Structures are given as structure tokens and as C-alpha cells.
Image (cartoon, helix red, strand yellow):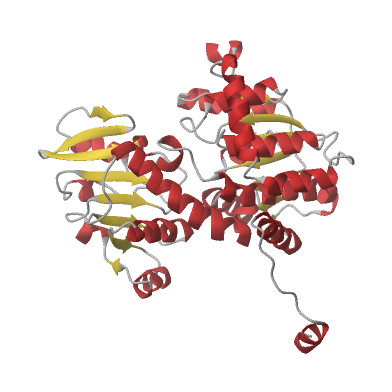
Amino acid sequence: MSRRLQTNPISDPKLAEQGRRLYEWAANRMTILEKFAAKNRTKKPLAGFKLGLCLHVTKETSVLAMAAKSLGAEIAICSANPLSVQNDVAAFLSSQGIRTFAWRGETKEEYDQCISSVLDTKPDIVTDDGGDLHTAAHKSRTKSIVGGTEETTSGVKRLQSMQRHGKLAYPVIAVNNAHTKHLFDNRYGTGQSTIDGIQRSAGVLFAGKHMVVSGYGWVGKGVAARAKGMGANVTITEVDPVKALEARMDGFDVMKLSEVAPYGDIFVTCTGQTSIIRKEHFVKMKNGAILANAGHFDVEINIQDLHSVADAQPQTVRQDVEEFLVRGRKIYLLAKGRVVNLVAASGNPSEIMALSFANQLLSILHIAENHDMMELKLYDVPEEIDVAVARYALEAMGIKIDRQTEKQKKYQS
């Protein structure tokens, strides 16, 4: 175990006050969570439950953690990414009695040890972002766990694989599958924050640039739409013919990555797959090409291939920007190939994360109440939770909508 984890599993306790201010800033924009928590606070429905969280340790995550704590939960948290931790938020959570194992810049070994430390607390319910906590738990650490939730497409895919092979050891609610999660968080949240991360790190003008977006799922749709709105010429690359056709119908060019590689100014991967941009693409890229990843893991841009074709060791030219010389041409890698919106920016806006984390909180409550009746399988978020989140979100925006009349209800029955 690393010395840092043994002595102080956060960066600096003195940052707690700044973390508190960030928590309050986010909480003011995530009133849905407070409304849900307020309805249940006197009952303390999570009393006696230990929660193990592996999420990006941001101001938005602190709102979820504090809401769960107010409902009686005992909580341990680690980061879902070694480079996404906001150290002041980690310090604040630690000061509130939440066992926090997270600091920005963890090594791979330290990252794994932090996950192990959360599992050492013997959580009853685990909440993950990407599947690393679930995967680690399934290596003989599932005895105390009665259920879990999963935040991302990448994590859900890993859990689906476990289920297919009969290895899923506890029920998991796929929060990512909720309409009020992926339709909004993935598309509007990650779409905006990815552009923010590229802008903060590279500082480039989007108008007139040729952006190549790999993957036209909800994240890819969001990134493409926002780039187009800023004046970029966007090309989509896909392996799914239906999504490729949809991209074309949405007004985007659709090409093979190998064909568009020589022309792109900015490349963004949004697939959840490995080795999307590889050696054969790097050697074709023009001088000044920028590479960014908006998927969960740092495998979509093949970093090993990039190093193998580089003329020399990369140079850091700006914060979160590395310059590679490839056949005399400069290629820029952002955020070391990790999620650019969290490493180079602040992640998704609080208003969007309110939807995702309301789904998380209500799914945790659902597991706490119903785990004895749940099978060892992957569940979608119950429809009543999805609808409740949408209604609360509209209320927070001051929007009222119509309701069906009795005649209309009878007509549909």
C-alpha cells in the first residue's frame, strides 16, 4: 500500500472549506436531490446501510454523497478516474465523516488500492461509474453486497458481460439506461463539457475547424451537435450502420476513420471501445491535429501506438496538452487520453448531474427496500423513478405541463 494511502487518503485536509463552498454552489443547482432527500430524511431509510461509491469526486458527486448521508447511510468513496478528483471536494467529504480515498494524480496502483480500501469497509450497496468497483468486488469481495448501481454505458456493458457468463453476484440497477440519465447527461452534459475540456486545454477556435467524432451514441450526438453549433464542420465515423444512417440524416458527413484521418483538425472518441484511433490513423494525420477522448476509459486512443510512431518523447506544451512529433508533424494529445471533460475541465454541469444523481439516489433507496426480492441480474431503473425525476426537474425549472383528462385516459385504455 502506498505511503500516501496509509497516512492521508486525500490530498490536503486544509482544502475542506473551499470544498464546502463548491458543494454549496452545486447543491443550489441540484435542488432535485434535496427535495427527494427531504421527503425521506426523518425516516432515515438508509440507516444501517454502508454505501461504497466509485464516482468522479467532483462538487456534483458531493451533493449525492451528502444526500445519502442525510438519509442515514455510512459512506466510503473513491474516484472513478485517477485524474478527475477535485482535491478540495475530497477534503470536504472527508471532513463530513465520509471515508474518502481520492486525490488527483493517483498512480494506477494507488487507484486500485483506493478501490480496495472502499471494499474493505464491507459496503452493502455499491455505486459505480465505469465498472471498476463492480469488477474488483467480483474478485471474491461480494459477500456483504446486496445490490449496486452503475452510472455509465461502459460500466453497463461490463455488467452485461458478467450476466451473460452467469457471474453477476448481486442485482445491479443500470442507472445509465434511465431516459432522464442518458438522454440528458450523455447528450447535453457530456456534449457541452467535452467542448469545454477541449477549449480549456487547447484554446482553439471551433468555427471552421474539421472535427471528427468517432461514435454516434448519445455522447457522440451531443459532442457533434455542440461542435456544429460552434461552426465546426463535423464528420462522424461509425461501425453501426443504423447509427451511421442516423448521423447522415442529422446532416453530418459519415466516413471511414482511415479516409478522414488526413483532413481532421480535432478528433474526439465517444465509443466505449478500445483502439479506435490507432497507428494507421496517426501516421496519416496532418500537422496540428488534436486528439481528445470523451469515453470513460483511456483506451479509445491507442497511446502505445502513438508513442511507437513518435519521432521523439512527447513534450508538455500546455496544461493537459502533450505534443507528439510523428513523421515531422505535430499531433496534440489532450488529458493523456483520459476523459477530457473531467480531466481538463470540471465535468458535466450541476443541473445535468442532478438528473443522473437523483436516479442514483432513488435507485439506491429502491435496492435498500427491495434487495431481498431482487434476482441476480441487471435491472433498468423503475419507470416510476424515471418519471419522478423528470417531473421534479421540470418543477425546478418552473415549468408546468398538461395532464391527461379522464376521457383521454379512457380513450387510451
Relative vertical location of residue 382 with respect to residue 277 in this rendering, above or below: below
Relative vertical location of residue 327 with respect to residue 93 in this rendering, above or below: below
Give whichever of 20, 322 is nearer the camera: 20
State which quadrant residue 21 falls in.
top right
Residue at far right of view: 43
Q: Where in the figure is residue 105, as x and y percent of width and height?
A: 45, 24
- Relative side of 221 to 356, left or right: left
Residue in the image at 21% along x and 27% along y: 313
State which quadrant residue 20 falls in.
top right
Give whichever of 299, 68 is nearer the camera: 68
Q: Where in the figure is residue 258, as x and y percent of width and height?
A: 22, 58
Residue in the image at 44% along x and 58% along y: 222
Residue in the image at 61% along x and 21% along y: 17
Q: Where in the figure is residue 145, as x and y percent of width and height?
A: 75, 38
Q: Which quadrant holds the C terminus?
A: bottom right
Q: Which quadrant holds the N terminus?
A: top right
Residue in the image at 39% along x and 57% along y: 226
Residue at far left of view: 328
